[in-house]
């Protein structure tokens, strides 16, 4: 597993080859099997493949034009309503303070990382895109206002092999017994 984690990269150049449907299913299956608090599974994944919809999503993602090279996007949506009876008419955005939303985001993030790693294992490249505007992306995909889009994951066969990006050393980030 550590070798898989070491070799994964964010990929921003893709070939035009369509994704093998079985590989895509396997990536989604990796998300489905992710752990979540109380096993609430507060997530939904939208697979976007049409040129028109990908273009619209890219435009809500601050026009990150490189995204269009990927033949598919997986949009990961955190669903706080799956975790609580909270007001279903609530409007969520980047400033929402709700604890239940934070928990749904936490769980959905785990599912996304599962997808990134399984995609890599299937020979596919991905890049978690988090730089988009919540209020713009939701209407493009018909997502209700009480759901929170956590990430857009362009996915496809990689056409680049970027070097590893630097990480902090363990000595900077691990403490023992206390802070
Ligand atoms: C939550 C999150 C949001 C990100 N958003 C973007 C983004 O909008 N655009 C982009 O090009 N990369 C984005 N990235 C990719 C990061 O830049 C990348 O993971 C980081 O530089 C480390 O590189 P690596 O993934 O190749 O190890 C995002 C990554 C994460 C985890």
Image: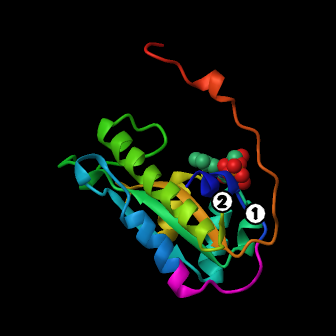
Q: Secondary structure at mark 2?
A: loop
Give coordinates of residue 156: x percent, y percent: 67, 75
- Magenta region, residue range: 14-23
Which residue is denoted by mark 1 in the rendering? 12
Give coordinates of residue 30: x percent, y percent: 44, 66
How packed mark 1 is, by other alpha carbons closer than 10 Å (few <14, some 14-19, many 20 or more), is: many
* Residue 113, label in figure: none
Give coordinates of residue 179: x percent, y percent: 48, 13
Q: Nearer the viewer, residue 109 or 141?
A: 109
Please name the residue shown 44% across and 13% down the image: 178
Check the picture and name the quadrant holding the N terminus.
Answer: bottom right
Q: Is residue 15 magenta?
A: yes
Which residue is denoted by mark 2 in the rendering? 127
Please name the residue shown 71% across and 67% down the image: 67
Q: Does 179 sit left or right of 172 as displayed?
A: left
Q: Is the residue at mark 2 in contact range of ligand 1, meaning its CB lies under 8 Å from it? A: yes
Give coordinates of residue 28: x percent, y percent: 45, 71
The vertical placement of 15 against 66, above or below, is below
């Amino acid at each position: 597993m550590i070798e898989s984690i070491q070799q994964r990269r964010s990929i921003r150049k893709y070939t035009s080859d369509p994704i093998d449907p079985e590989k895509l299913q396997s990536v989604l299956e990796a998300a489905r099997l992710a752990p979540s608090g109380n096993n609430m599974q507060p997530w939904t994944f939208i697979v976007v493949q049409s040129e028109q919809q990908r273009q619209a999503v890219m435009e809500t993602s601050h026009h990150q034009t490189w995204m269009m090279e990927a033949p598919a996007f997986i949009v990961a949506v955190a669903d706080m309503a799956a975790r609580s009876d909270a007001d279903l008419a609530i409007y969520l955005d980047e400033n929402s303070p709700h604890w239940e939303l934070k928990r749904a985001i936490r769980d959905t993030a785990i599912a996304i990382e599962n997808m990134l790693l399984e995609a890599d294992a299937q020979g596919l490249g991905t890049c978690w895109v988090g730089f988009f505007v919540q209020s713009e992306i939701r209407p493009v995909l018909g997502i209700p206002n009480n759901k929170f889009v956590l990430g857009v994951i362009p996915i496809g066969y990689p056409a680049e092999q970027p070097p590893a990006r630097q990480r902090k050393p363990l000595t900077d980030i691990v403490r023992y017994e206390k802070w």
